[in-house]
Amino acid sequence: MELPSSQLGTKEYWDAQYEHELANFESHGDIGEIWFEDSVDRLLEWILDTDLITTQSSIIDIGCGNGAFLLNLAAEGFTSLHGIDYSQKAVELAQAIAAQKEMNISYKKVDLVNCNEESLAIEYDVCHDKGTYDAVSLCPDDPSSKRAAYMKAIHRMTRKNGLFIITSCNWTQEELSEQFSDCFGILDKGFSTCTSTFKKIQKSSLPALIRIVLC
């Protein structure tokens, strides 16, 4: 099953969106829209409470946008924070906001579905996605292949015994479980009725975890 295509699945849309938000930030100091804010608040509460993540854990935000998620973690004392986005304007916005707030967060432009192996060479304790898989799924151009490339990239970037956390507003818990079944299996129930935690299947290594948050 595929989702109906949307402009939200195009790079052109996000480039224009973040060019506008960057101009607003430079003019008025407005960091821009915070997507899925309620879900992020619940997730942050869980991260601060769980023993699976520490302030020293390496965390990468996939499709970081303006970096709002990482800013929250930096404010809580997390020290190894990284963000990637396929929009250069998003990266520039996130860098500008972090610099203004004097927060040490690294950002770079990476397109997970069209990147070389060198871009995926580093493994992280936590890989976090807030809407990026949804955007990939909404792409008008061969979304199935792009989703497969995305899953392969995420699997490679997640360290053994690490965490992959994904927030989705377009897929159900059951659909995500099925789509990621080659790499991830269910671990236990999550922290709310809208959340589940899953266990990553490694062919020749120890497992990692995945937590799915539904809007």
Image (cartoon, rainbow, N blue to C red):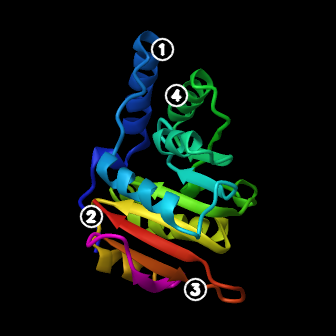
Q: Earlier in the sequence, mark 2 or mark 4?
A: 2
Residue 27 in picture, x, y percent from top left: 43, 10
The answer to whether residue 139 shows anywhere in this view is no
Indicate the secondary structure of the residue bearing disc 1.
Answer: helix
> What amino acid does circle 4 point to?
Leu
| Residue 62, above or below 146 | above
Camera-nearest label, 2 or 3: 3
Residues under labels 2 and 4: Cα distance? 29 Å
| Residue 5, above or below 159 | above
| Residue 96, above or below 214 | above
Q: Is residue 22 magenta?
A: no
> Which residue is the site of mark 2?
3
Residue 138 in picture, x, y percent from top left: 33, 56
Q: Earlier in the sequence, mark 2 or mark 3?
A: 2
Q: Is residue 126 left or right of residue 128?
A: right
Which stretch did the figure color magenta? 182-194
Residues under labels 2 and 3: Cα distance? 26 Å
Residues under labels 2 and 1: Cα distance? 36 Å
> Which residue is the site of mark 1?
26
